[in-house]
Image (cartoon, rainbow, N blue to C red):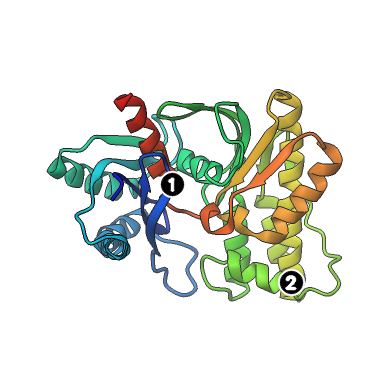
Amino acid sequence: MTPLVLGVDTSNYTTSVCAVSVTGELVAEARRLLPVPSGQRGLRQSDALFLHVQQLPMVMAELRQQLGAVTAAPTPWVAAGVSVRPRPWASSYMPVFHAGERFVMTWAQTLGLPVVRTSHQEGHLAAAEAFLPHAGADPFLAVHISGGTSDVVFARPARWGYRIEMVGEGADLHAGQFVDRVGVAMGLPFPAGPSLEVLAASAQRRDLRLPGAVRGAAMSFSGPCTAALRALERGEEPAEIAYAVQACIANSLAKAIAHASALHPEAGRVVIAGGVASNQWIAARVRHRLRQVCPRLEVAFAPARYASDNALGVARIAARGWAAEVV
């Protein structure tokens, strides 16, 4: 069996592991959402960390089972990667990532393997790039849009991940929080994204507007969230509100990306990843609007399964770093 690299990501709501070849091809993966009690909009960090510790053996068992179906021989691991912080800055910190980091350090030291530490955000970008036909060394614009981030960045591929320059940082409430707060208020399960997308598809009028707030490439969703909750209180149809939430996010995204593209005309592509990017209606709307205002900009969304939290990108970054060291 080809040598493999392990990737581990323990984000706010998903325990993820992945095995890739040394050239970055996906071999097997497993992930589990952290259980969130009905009616709640999330978990405390201490609870999420504890749940990751509980779930890591389970997802590793699932990964091993998948690899066992490929070959009966022992798995020839050569390296591991793990996300240790939300974003690639020393000041970026969340306790949940300790679960994955401690697990990988123990596992790798037992096997005598090198470990590549990266960030959750870089993992999202690397996972999205895995499905692009022309990914390479060229810099690109990227959007990481989720429950904890609404970042627009300028990214340059590097040996150990990416060199990232912030172009527009989420001003307050992030897009994923916007979706979850409105969705849970309407009785949808957490995380509310998939259910809200289904509900929005049944909207008939589609005339409710939630004006977004975008300054440069910085997006703010606290105002639209307040407006959506007020609309729910006054009796607007939930499907119409769900549709308006999607439209607000898509329009804000397109506006922020257009601004970033004007600042960085050397970037011929924008890569959009994160849980909110898995919404297919939002993806189609953003593509349509950017074709009109930025016709030369290639717009690439990560596939829905790999837009949400996963360990594929973390594993690919580790494989790239390991290969560079070997050479």
**Dot 2 lies on which element?**
loop
Q: Nearest to the eye among marks 1 and 2: give it.
A: 1
Label 1 vs label 2: CA separation? 35 Å
Dot 2 amino acid type: Ala
Residue under numbered circle 1 = 25
Residue 41's place in the image compared with 160, above or below, is: below
Based on the displayed image, in which of its 4 quarters is residue 299 positioned? top right
Q: Residues within 10 Å of mark 2 (few under 14, many from 20)?
A: some
Dot 1 amino acid type: Glu
Based on the displayed image, in which of its 4 quarters is residue 213 positioned? top right
Q: Measured from the top left, where is residue 132 in percent x and y?
A: 60, 43
Circle on res. 201: 2
Q: Measured from the top left, where is residue 272 in percent x and y?
A: 62, 45
Q: Measured from the top left, where is residue 92 in percent x and y?
A: 42, 35
Circle on res. 111: none
Q: Residues within 10 Å of mark 1 (few under 14, many from 20)?
A: some
